[in-house]
Amino acid sequence: MKVLFVGLGSIGKRHLGNMLQVSQEMGIEVTVDALRSGNRPLPPEIEQAVAHQYTQPEELGRYDIAFITNPTHLHQQTILELADKVDAFFIEKPIVDDCTLDVSALHLDGKKAYVAAPMRWCGAYLELKRQLAQIQPYCARVICSSYLPDWRPGVDYRTVYSAHRDMGGGVTIDLIHEWDYLVDLLGQPLECYNLKGTYSHLEIDSDDLSVYIARYPNLLAEVHLDYFGRGYRRSIELMCQDGSLVADFGQGTVTLPSGETIHCEEPVNQRYLREMRYFLEYVQGTEMESCNSPQQALKVLALTQGQALDKR
């Protein structure tokens, strides 16, 4: 299987390592090439895994899979450049930085494509889905709060894409995971309202706070996203008749309305390994539409801007 990586930053390196591990476990032989924006040397362990490095799309042959892991604002251009050279795409989230884009503009007809959604594959989330089948929630309260300068130790937070609106940064789409898993969990809201802006001391031009209220047929949901919280908080609370069902993704626990706590602690990379196994099985299978297709990812992207999904 011929595999192309476009973008070998931190997330690209993670996906490359996981793809090599899972493909070996599945008995899939792979050859990896990289399409790069420059000639800066790769770390030795990455360079060893890459057969060929290219800087121009015209130099490429055909590939079974392409991993689109470069900055968000380059995704659309990259997908269009590779559409006639690649059979299946793994596209890092968010799929693009334009929430008004129609899926037809990506020219992915007849291609397999999956948009990254790693929160759906973490142990606490999988347990939450199992428990939710037994309750009827009245409301949902979601929070993702963390301190942007702590995200990448040793890297100036002001230089990364998250800090810059024109590079696809800002909590509204950077933290799209929350809306992705909420839609997977509860379905499409009927209405959604969003207030956002830049309010903290952080030296960024992207939004560092985004707050939502969404209406579903039988419940309301609140979503809070920020870049300035000291101490990592990532959780969902579902209130119901007998109490609350709480998934704390930072702690890796699920607390039931009875008060019982189910422990789902695991290394963070475990969710990415599950996701990679799903993707490679999807590529080898007969289903054309993935569990997070480009069309679905674009609908969720529109929702991050406060647009209800049924209006797309």
Image: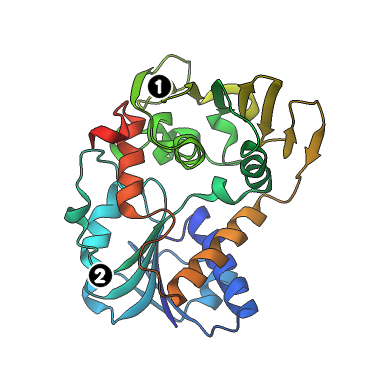
Q: Does residue 140 sit above or below 67 in this rendering?
A: above
Q: Secondary structure at mark 2?
A: loop
- Identify the residue position indicated by label 1 in the image: 215
Position of residue 206 measured from the top left corner of the image (x, y, whole percent) = 36, 27
Horizontally, is 38 left or right of 140 in the view? left
Q: Quadrant of residue 138?
A: top right
- Identify the residue position indicated by label 2 in the image: 110
Position of residue 68 measured from the top left corner of the image (x, y, whole percent) = 37, 60
Residue closest to the eye, 130 or 207: 130
Choose mark 2 or mark 1, whichever is in front: 1
In the image, farthest residue toward the left: 105
Q: Does residue 185 sit above or below 285 in this rendering?
A: above
Horizontally, is 162 left or right of 233 in the view? left
Q: CA distance from mark 2 to mark 1?
A: 35 Å
Q: Which residue shows up at 71% across the image and 20% down it?
A: 242
In the image, farthest residue toward the right: 260
Q: Which image quarter is the C terminus in? A: top left
Q: Which residue shows up at 68% across the image and 23% down it?
A: 244
Q: Which residue shows up at 36% across the image and 62% down it?
A: 289
* Dot 1 amino acid type: Arg
Q: Quadrant of residue 214?
A: top left
What is the basis of the colouring in this image?
Answer: rainbow
**Which class describes the residues within 10 Å of circle 1: few (<14), some (14-19), or many (20+)?**
some
Q: Which residue shows up at 43% across the image and 40% down it?
A: 160
- Residue 283 visible here: yes
**Which class describes the residues within 10 Å of circle 2: few (<14), some (14-19), or many (20+)?**
few
Residue closest to the eye, 53 or 140: 140
* Dot 2 amino acid type: Gly
Position of residue 201 measured from the top left corner of the image (x, y, whole percent) = 48, 16
Q: Which image quarter is the N terminus in? A: bottom left
Q: Earlier in the sequence, mark 2 or mark 1?
A: 2
Q: Secondary structure at mark 1?
A: strand
